Amino acid sequence: MDAHYAIETEGLEKIYRSRFRGRQIRAVSDLTLRVPEGVKFGLLGANGAGKTTFVKMLLSAVHPTAGRAALFGRNAGEPESRRPVGYLPENHRFPTYFTGAGMLNFYGALSGMAAVERGKRIPELLAVVGLSDWGDVRIKKYSKGMLQRLGLAQALLHRPRLLVLDEPTDGVDPLGRRQIRDTLNSLLDTGVTIFINSHLLSEVEVFCDRVAIIHKGRLALEGRIRDLVAGRGYKLVAVQATDEVRRAVSVVTASATLESDRLETQMSDRGELNRVIDILRQSGALIESVTATVSTLEDVFIRTTQGETAIAPPQATEVMA
């Protein structure tokens, strides 16, 4: 596999076998994905879609049933492949009797960092995540947002080339989410690849360059966010409309509502818009406004997972920087 990719999988699959009637549960199915170095990449999916299982296979916490996974070109099953990886799991737990600095020192020692290096690195990281004044305070006094930032410092401790973050802002207030985003953005000049597993679509849309959507264990969609949300539409509002007009408009677009004499409708392209305008002019209704609209990542996600975007057959999906 290619060392130019921070993450590369080919036909990755995980099947869990239940003891009940020998039932099989396919958590991830034939998932092929390539993520080059230096990008901000989001992995999206509903609860139970297979996101966490996918991440665990990357980190060899779960062994795949079939397929291959590599980190920087090295087989993910090899311990050395994980040395350049920093990981922040969802719902992480730190011993509350540690201070923030003490916890980082403990984890640094576990990873083999020399004491001199830890002594220099820990104050740097506490400053980066905004916890300089809390390094000597016991973790039991930390808020949720502070715990997430401390977890991020732990993931960054050994200067990783790849950050794998599982729901990094879940349960964090808006200010804390902004601080975490700012911290992550400050790392980009160092060439770190940031891979976020999340169901918080608004956060991913604000932060990431590219996303992949997993649906029922399969790769359903992947691409640059700006391309995925680029599909434009139009919202039209008209007055002095009748139910007969609404029915005529509904032939063109299914999204047409009438309240009193006020008609609101949504068109997907200019062709639909012009046909609706012709109907309204012929009926004598008055057009009040026409507004261009842009899809959000949430719109794209819902269309994809509800079947409006077909799930393509598994194939090599190359993510370009």
Image (tube, grey):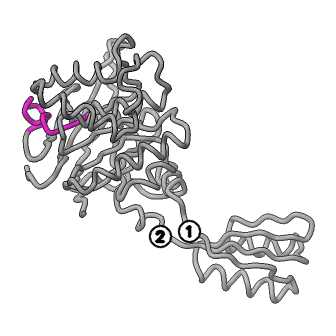
Q: Relative to 47, does residue 268 appear above or below in the rendering? A: below
Crowding near the residue tagged with mark 1, few <14, some 14–19, many ≥20 C-alpha atoms within 10 Å: few
Q: Which residue is mark 1?
A: 294
The residue closer to the viewer here, 101 or 14, is: 101
The residue closer to the viewer here, 259 or 158, is: 158
Report the quarter where the C terminus lies: bottom left
Residue at screen point 56% across, 68% down: 294
Left/right of residue 141 with respect to residue 286 in the rendered view: left
85 inside magenta stretch: yes
User: Magenta segment range?
Assistant: 75-86
Give residue 24's position: percent from left, percent from top.
32, 24
Residue at screen point 19% across, 47% down: 7
Q: CA distance from mark 1 to mark 2?
A: 6 Å
Left/right of residue 132 with respect to residue 106 in the rendered view: right
Amino acid found under the numbered disc labelled 2: Ala
Residue at screen point 68% across, 69% down: 266
The residue closer to the viewer here, 130 or 4, is: 130
Left/right of residue 83 with respect to residue 249 in the rendered view: left
Q: Relative to 219, does residue 124 appear above or below in the rendering? A: above
Amino acid found under the numbered disc labelled 1: Val
Crowding near the residue tagged with mark 2, few <14, some 14–19, many ≥20 C-alpha atoms within 10 Å: few
Give residue 18's position: percent from left, percent from top.
33, 17
Q: Relative to 110, does residue 55 appear above or below in the rendering? A: below
264 inside magenta stretch: no
Q: Secondary structure at mark 1?
A: strand
Q: Earlier in the sequence, mark 1 or mark 2?
A: 2
Q: Which residue is mark 2?
A: 230
